Image: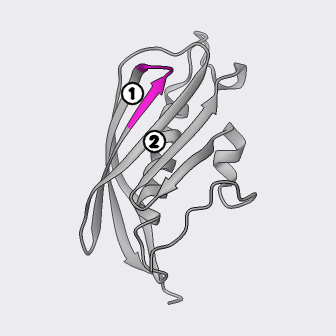
Amino acid sequence: MAKHFPLKSKGFNPFGQLIGLDFTRSEEGFTRGVLEVDETHMNPHKVVHGGVLYAMVDTGMGGAAYSCLNEEELCATVEIKIVYLAPVTSGRLTCDTNLVHRGKRIAILESEVRNGERLVAKATGTYSLFRSSEG
């Protein structure tokens, strides 16, 4: 049975809460995360810091992978390649993530981050799948 990735669960994703990342959809192999841009997300040039976009992608990928795990399994980021396509100065960011492949030990995922309709970042990631030492 697949794990459930909760949309609104205080304490489940403390770092996501810190940056204001909320999830509006979670299905098997898919997540949608949203973030309202504010001044705390900006770099010194008044553009959203690349780390904010990276955090959205990493968290979205983890959630999409998590939704395909058995109860005794966990996942962890191995690598992510992200391409920043356009600067963001305001508005809402939406990160859609899809599971591309799930093997026995790795999962491959893709994310797109949009600012409104504009594609601002695209990423691919590899996640390690492993059994919990407690299970």
Q: Is residue 122 left or right of residue 24?
A: left
The spot of residue 124 in percent (x, y) is 30, 43
- Residue hosting label 2: 57
* Picture layout, residue 18 above or below residue 62: above
* The magenta stretch spans residue 39: no
Residue visible at 49% across and 27% down in the picture = 50
SS for callout 2 = helix
Q: Is residue 11 left or right of residue 117?
A: right
Q: In which quarter of the image is residue 20?
A: top right
Q: Is residue 134 left or right of residue 36?
A: left
Q: Do the residues labelled 1 and 2 touch (CB within 8 Å)?
A: yes
- Residue hosting label 1: 121
Q: Residues within 10 Å of mark 1 (few under 14, many from 20)?
A: many
- Residue occupying the far top of the picture: 45
Colouring scheme applied when the structure was drawn: one colour
Q: Which amino acid does label 2 sit on?
A: Val
The spot of residue 116 in percent (x, y) is 51, 20
Q: How crowded is mark 2: few (under 14 residues within 10 Å), some or many (20 or more)?
A: many
- Which residues are the magenta region? 112-118
Residue visible at 58% across and 12% down in the picture = 89
SS for callout 1 = strand
Cα–Cα span, label 1 and label 2? 9 Å
Q: Quadrant of residue 9?
A: bottom right
